[in-house]
Image (cartoon, rainbow, N blue to C red):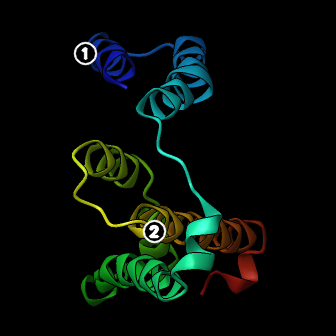
């Protein structure tokens, strides 16, 4: 992630040719980001939900809370779909799960609940992006 960020800063500093920008995006999102998450080792253990079903509610609450926090931008006039799109989180939850697991500060099932919350934000962002794309294709619905 740090390498992708540094490359992005370098390209932004000198001006980006489209081809280079696409190649850097592909390297970062296709290789470096997945490698980062695998390296951190965060995983979702669904058996923990069977042992502690109340943590499913915690995961849903975390996901819904994250989306709700990003929908507050509606007050500033931003469309709800853009706020929901901004809610997608994966890096921070994965890092929190990894650090919390390594430090043994999470009870069994909390790491899975955090990852479930992250998956809910990603699902919400996917729905929002499809809604935005539909509006872009159909100029009548833009209003």
The answer to which image quadrant residue 12 occupies is: top left
The residue at the point 34 percent across, 86 percent down is 74
Residue 76: x and y in percent read 25, 83
Q: Which of 32 and 99 is in front in this view?
A: 99
Quadrant where the N terminus lies? Answer: top left
Q: Is residue 64 positioned above or below 109 on the image?
A: below
Q: In this orientation, which residue lies closer to the viewer: 110 or 16?
A: 110
Question: Callout 2: 10 Å neighbours few (<14), some, many (20+)?
Answer: many
Residue 13 is marked as: 1
User: Residue 141 sits in which quadrant?
Assistant: bottom right
Assign the C terminus to one quadrant of the image.
Answer: bottom right
25 left or right, relative to 71: right
Give the answer, above or below, for where 130 lies relative to 80.
above
Q: What element carries label 2?
A: loop
Mark 1 vs mark 2: which is more N-terminal? Answer: 1
Task: Specify few, some or many for label 1: CA neighbours under 10 Å numbering under 14, 14-19, or 20 or more.
Answer: few
Left or right: 131 as drawn, with respect to 121:
right
- Secondary structure of the residue carrying numbered label 1: helix
In this rendering, position of residue 104 left or right of residue 28: left
Q: Return the residue nearer the eye: 1 or 42.
A: 42
* Residue at position x 37%, y 55% in the image: 93
Q: Is residue 19 above or below residue 65?
A: above
Which label sits in the foreground, 1 or 2?
2
Q: How far apart are marks 1 and 2 (CA)?
A: 44 Å
Would you name the residue on which mark 2 appears?
109
Q: Where is residue 83 in the image (x, y as percent from the top left)?
A: 41, 74
Q: Place residue 27 in its image quadrant.
A: top right
Q: Residue at x 54, y 48 (%)?
A: 43
Q: Nearer the viewer, residue 46 or 142?
A: 46
Residue 116 location in percent, x, y?
A: 53, 68
């Amino acid at each position: 992630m740090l390498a992708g960020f540094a490359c992005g800063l370098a390209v932004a500093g000198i001006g980006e040719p489209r081809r280079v920008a696409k190649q850097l995006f592909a390297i970062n999102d296709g290789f470096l980001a997945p490698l980062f998450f695998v390296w951190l080792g965060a995983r979702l253990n669904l058996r923990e939900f069977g042992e502690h079903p109340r943590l499913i509610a915690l995961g849903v609450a975390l996901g819904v809370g994250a989306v709700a926090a990003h929908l507050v931008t509606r007050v500033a006039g931003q469309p709800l779909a853009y706020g929901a799109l901004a809610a997608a989180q994966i890096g921070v939850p994965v890092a929190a799960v990894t650090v919390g697991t390594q430090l043994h500060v999470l009870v069994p099932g909390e790491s899975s609940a955090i990852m479930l919350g992250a998956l809910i934000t990603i699902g919400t962002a996917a729905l929002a992006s499809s809604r935005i794309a539909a509006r872009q294709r159909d100029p009548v619905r833009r209003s």
